[in-house]
Image (cartoon, grey):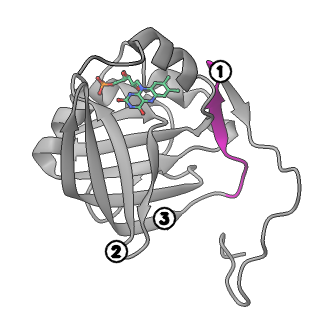
Amino acid sequence: MDHLAGVAQFKLGMRALAGAVSLVTCSHAGHRYGMTATAVCSAAAEPPTVLACINRSTTTNRAIAKSGVFCVNVLRHEDRELPGLFSGTHKGEGRFRQGEWTRLWSGSPVLSSALVSFDCRVANRLQHGTHSVFLGEVMALHLGRKGKALLYADGQYAKLASLAHGEPLPEGLDYWGE
Ligand SMILES: Cc1cc2nc3c(=O)[nH]c(=O)nc-3n(C[C@H](O)[C@H](O)[C@H](O)COP(=O)(O)O)c2cc1C
């Protein structure tokens, strides 16, 4: 069956879908890889699972497929310089010249200044058209720095602004441990 919507029309429509900006990273055979991604979301709570849609033509995709691990680093608006670096001409190691990087369970690069980092093992992978859909079971998690999320919508970066106070956390639980 023919596509009802054209690719250009689809991309135009997708500009309206605001997304949190993450850096999806991976370490394979002693080399670090990472790229900017907005196609990331929660996939299941039990077991804790995230979903990341990664273009099959990227070097990061190949590294994730080979290593079977990846880390999702959710960015704060203060780190708005990083998405350009992680989608620009430098590949692999060259992208890690900015930011403070550490590691958790999988060895994938973990950005210390991220809002949160989800360190995952690939539990499942679906190939669909240009992209791989990776389901990552969260093996370790780093609650990073307090701050506002960096968003991407209509081709530009934005900072999350609340319209009202969010739901309070349950008694005794403090997200940032303060
Ligand atoms: C704001 C933004 C969001 C992006 N989201 C995705 C995404 O969700 N999935 C994807 O495959 N590429 C996405 N990209 C494109 C990749 O970051 C880009 O192709 C990157 O250079 C791939 O790196 P690599 O080939 O070195 O692995 C996005 C780029 C930007 C600027």
What amino acid is labelled 2 in the image? Pro
Label 1 packing within 10 angstroms: few (<14), some (14-19), many (20+): few
Up/down of 2 relative to 86, above or below: above
Say if 87 sits above or below 53 in the image: above
- Quadrant field for ligand 1: top left
Q: Are marks 1 and 2 in contact (CB under 8 Å)?
A: no
Query: Which residue range is magenta in the image?
Result: 146-155
- The x and y percentages for residue 154 are 65, 21
State yes or no: residue 56 in magenta: no
Say which quarter of the image contains residue 79.
Answer: top right
Q: Which residue is tagged 3? A: 142
Main SS of the magenta part reads loop
Q: Quadrant of the N terminus?
A: top left
| Magenta residue check for 150 | yes
Distance CA(mark 1)–CA(mark 2):
33 Å
Q: In the image, is residue 122 above or below residue 86?
A: below
Q: Is 2 or 75 nearer to us in this picture?
A: 2
The secondary structure type at the circle numbered 3 is strand
Residue shown at the point (52%, 28%) measured from the top left: 83
| Residue wearing tag 1 | 154
List the residue tagged with mark 2.
Answer: 47
User: Which percent across, then down, holds residue 114?
Assistant: 56, 50
